[in-house]
Image (cartoon, rainbow, N blue to C red):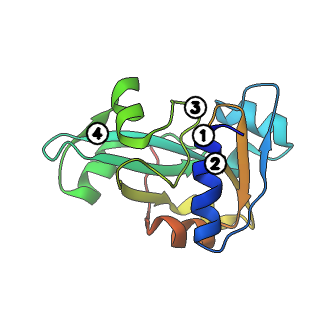
Amino acid sequence: MSESQVRVTAALAAAGVFAEIRSFAESTRTSQEAADAIGCTVAQIAKSVILKAKQSERHVLVVTSGANRVCEKSVALLLGEKVGRADAEFVRSRTGFVIGGVAPLAHAEPPITLIDEDLLQHTEVWAAAGTPHSVFRIQPQQLVALTAGRVASVKE
């Protein structure tokens, strides 16, 4: 298990959530790749999108359905400050994860977290477990509780 996966496992266990991390030989970096590897719908993939808040320079974690694109204008309205895409270096330094493997928890720095309301339609969703080849299954309500995320409409 990688250091990132160990960090995710420890964070889940500390919260009383015992989720099995599944690793794959093939990439689970994109929502479609993850859904294909798992055998679920793209909508059940809880993808972590990292944005950069322009004024505060904090990182914003938007956990959205793999079927959706994040609307930066909606996120900006929810936060009260402009946001933009984060580059790979910013993502790595703030989260401790590489793009394509950003877990929704166990970040190096605490993020501002928004959860796509569309994820709550499912009984279970799959999120990155710290690498572009690993995922874990979780109930959407557990995801909201674990991240202390604000449930909102974030899609285009």
Residue located 83% across and 35% down the image: 37
Lower sequence index among marks 2 and 4 = 2
In screen coordinates, is 127 left or right of 56?
right
Q: Amino acid at mark 1?
A: Glu
Q: Nearer the viewer, mark 3 or mark 2?
A: 2
Tell me if label 2 and label 1 are in contact, CB under 8 Å.
yes
Mark pair 2, 4: CA separation: 26 Å
**Considering only vertical position in the picture, is 5 above or below 142?**
above
Tell me the number on the disc at residue 153: none
Q: Amino acid at mark 4?
A: Lys
Q: Amino acid at mark 3?
A: Gly
Q: Position of residue 45 (x, y in %)?
A: 67, 47
Residue located 64% across and 48% down the image: 6
Lower sequence index among marks 3 and 4 = 4
Q: Nearer the viewer, mark 4 or mark 1?
A: 1
Residue carrying label 4: 52
Lower sequence index among marks 3 and 2 = 2
Q: Nearer the viewer, mark 2 or mark 4?
A: 2
